[in-house]
Amino acid sequence: EPEVTQTPSHQVTQMGQEVILRCVPISNHLYFYWYRQILGQKVEFLVSFYNNEISEKSEIFDDQFSVERPDGSNFTLKIRSTKLEDSAMYFCASSGQGEGVSGYTFGSGTRLTVV
Amino acid sequence: RKEVEQDPGPFNVPEGATVAFNCTYSNSASQSFFWYRQDCRKEPKLLMSVYSSGNEDGRFTAQLNRASQYISLLIRDSKLSDSATYLCVVNAGNNRKLIWGLGTSLAVNP
């Protein structure tokens, strides 16, 4: 079964440092997403991406965040200057054309710890 | 009213029990409804979509009441492996963004 792959599985970084979280969506999917989950809290939408541009973003996704699809396979989330409150699980997801939201596939997540 | 609200739980039930989860949502424009399952520190996995007519998948039955903006999940004959957090999820109106409940934790005991 096709998978969404995320790397690294765990990243520890110092406050103020930049981090890049990487995702390889399912190859024929066209819609890409980042969600995050702070420990003990609900999953929160960050951003959706389609046709090489952001289609929607949440209030959380401020100027410190950016996404990129640098080549045909990777989809990255960059946090420019990490804060302690950015510590969370970050999930990448993708879905295909015409599947609607039921076609979401999530990656196994990157646990980001900011110290 | 929270966007998606669930029973706080946790639910502790013996094997074989029937357990019901409830969820309400605030956005009347939501079009798609789901139950996801999340194991501890893992990614959410789609359990089932929820349709207006109600739908069943083995031991799992989901119901949707659009008028009341209410979604339910029933698990019959619960197994140890059903122990997880169950997340009620709706889309935010006419787009692909998903809004998540906090989840209800289920522990099925031998």
Image: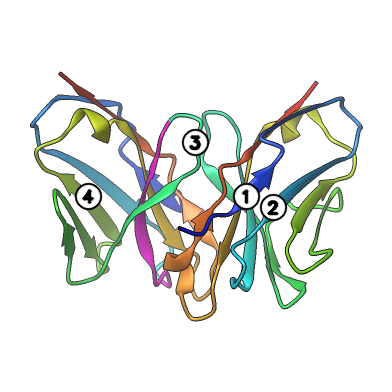
Q: Are marks 1 and 4 in contact (CB under 8 Å)?
A: no
On the same chain, marks 1 and 4? The answer is no
Q: Are marks 3 and 1 on the same chain?
A: no
Label 4's element? strand
Q: Residue furthest front?
A: A1
Q: Compared with residue A47, is residue A90 higher up or lower down, i.e. above or below?
A: above
Label 4: chain letter: B
Q: Amino acid at mark 4?
A: Leu
Q: CA distance from mark 1 to mark 4?
A: 30 Å
Residue type marked 3: Lys
The disc label shown at residue B93, or none: none
Q: Are marks 2 and 1 in contact (CB under 8 Å)?
A: yes
Question: Pointer 3 and pointer 1: residues touching (CB < 8 Å)?
Answer: no
Q: Which residue is mark 2?
A: A23
Q: Which residue in the protein does label 3 denote?
A: B42
Pair 1/4: label in front? 1
Span highlighted in magenta in the image:
B29-39
Q: Amino acid at mark 2?
A: Cys
Looking at the rendered structure, the secondary structure element under dot 1 is strand
Q: Residue at x 74, y 49 (%)?
A: A22
Mark 3 neighbour density, 10 Å: few (under 14) some (14–19) many (20 or more) = some
In which chain is the residue bearing label 1? A
Of labels 2 and 1, earlier in sequence is 1
Label 4, label 3: how far apart the Cα atoms are: 21 Å
Q: Is residue B71 left or right of residue B77?
A: right
Q: Are marks 2 and 3 in contact (CB under 8 Å)?
A: no
**Distance (Cα) linking label 2 and label 3:** 16 Å
Query: Which label sits on residue A5?
Result: 1
Which color mode does the image show? rainbow
- Residue occupied by mark 4: B73
